[in-house]
Amino acid sequence: MFQLIDKLEKNNQLTKDEFIYLLSNFNQDVSKYLFDKARNISQKFFGNKIYVRGLIEFTNFCINDCFYCGIRKSNKNCDRYRLTKEQILDCCKKGYELGFRTFVLQGGEDLKYRHDDMIDIISTIRQEFPDCAITLSIGERTYDEYLKYFEAGADRYLLRHESANFDHFNKLHTKNQSLDKRKECLFNLKKIGYQVGTGFMVGSPFQTFETLAEDLLFIHELKPEMIGIGPFIPHKDTPFKNFSPGRLDLTLFLIGVLRLMIPNALIPATTALGTIDPKGRELGILAGANVVMPNLSPVEVRNKYLLYNGKICTGEEAAECRMCLQNRMKSIGYELVVDRGDFKPLEALA
Ligand code: 5AD
Ligand code: FES
């Protein structure tokens, strides 16, 4: 197994069978070997710097009904909200003062915001915060819509593929969603020129080591600039309420694997990771992640954007998440930086 990790480091890639073998058989020693390598790579390219993204959860309305997600359309217990343009700009203003230079606008697939509203919001942020990156995370749209958002000033887009295995993807979603469509969106985003993020949940229902290996192969094919993974965590008002959460050790191991696959990728230690373990995000950084995403949403709505139960960061002040993460990172020898934190080619980093 140690040789497989050496091989992965050298080639940034393994075969499907090799990935399956590694994921099903790794132990603590192998993890340590992997994390040391992953951390060294991060250190070499990013030093002890951790990039920060201010997450603005601006709507929890959604037309989709993903079986895992707490804001799915059919969840009648979800208290729906939509932030106004002014509220969103206010989040950005507070964020800017706190040192954020990337704003992530994340929401359900909310048709009320289609076209003009989004373009208006994006172009206003672009004008008022010219030195900041704008990341969108608003699901599947047409090529033309993606293009218009890009032209309005959006720089990056997060759209997890969720599973690169067709059967598995279909077990997580209703019939109106498809893996083909998802992949098409991701390749469209790349073509337009966005820095693209994809990813998946670890331990989602019906996931196997084989589907995970397929996720890794898909990531190798797409070559995303950003890769977000976190453990699946059940939400009580979803069809998956009785499934177990994803494993911490496996999530961390996969972060290490992804760092070796795409050495210069931006990989967050996610909120879900911090939710299944109080030190989850610190462990994520020590396994090779280099990004954190403090919550910048208005405090009044934070406990309404619940994709899963037990979500952390729902009761804090706007400034608190950043401070909290700053201290957490400091405790393991890392520092948050005031920087857009763009993806850079390897040549530019070396
Ligand atoms: N547990 C963990 N992650 C979840 N997501 C959605 N629901 C859950 C859940 N129950 C993730 C999905 C989505 C991202 C925004 O949050 O992967 O792409
Ligand atoms: Fe939000 Fe710690 S990061 S409370």
Image (spheres, grey):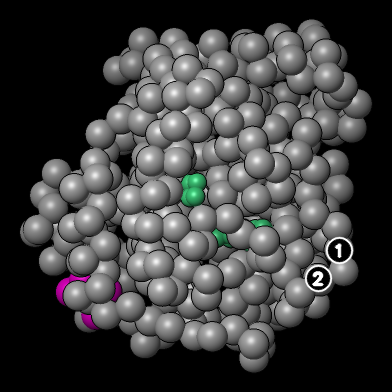
Ligand 1 within 8 Å, label 1 CB: no
Q: Quadrant of residue 73?
A: bottom right
As drawn, the label of residue 218 is: none
Crowdedness of circle 2 by 10 Å Cα count: few (<14), some, many (20+)? some
Quarter of the rendered image showing ligand 1: bottom right
Residue 108 in the image: x percent, y percent? 49, 74
Q: Mark yes or no: residue 232 visible.
A: yes
Residue at 38% in and 25% down = 335
- The magenta stretch is 117-121
The amino acid type found where label 2 is placed reads Phe
Q: Amino acid at mark 1?
A: Phe
Q: Secondary structure at mark 2?
A: loop
Q: Crowding near pointer 1: few (<14 within 10 Å), some, many (20+)? A: some
In the image, the residue with mark 2 has its CB under 8 Å from the nearest atom of ligand 1: yes
Asked if the magenta segment contains residue 319, the reply would be no
Q: Quadrant of the C terminus?
A: top left
- Residue 50 lies, in percent from the top left, at 41, 29
Q: In which image quadrant can residue 90 be found? A: bottom left
Label 1: state its secondary structure: loop
Q: Can you give x and y, in whole percent of width and height, for residue 230 in the image?
A: 64, 47
Report if residue 120 lies within the magenta region. yes
Locate residue 281, reporting x and y percent. Answer: 58, 37
- In the picture provided, is 217 more to the left or to the right than 100? right
Q: Which residue is mark 2?
A: 240
- Residue at 72% over, 29% down: 253
Give the quarter of the image for residue 242: bottom right
For the point 60% across and 18% down, the residue is 38
Which residue does the numbered mark 1 point to in the structure image? 243
Q: Is residue 234 above or below residue 216?
A: below
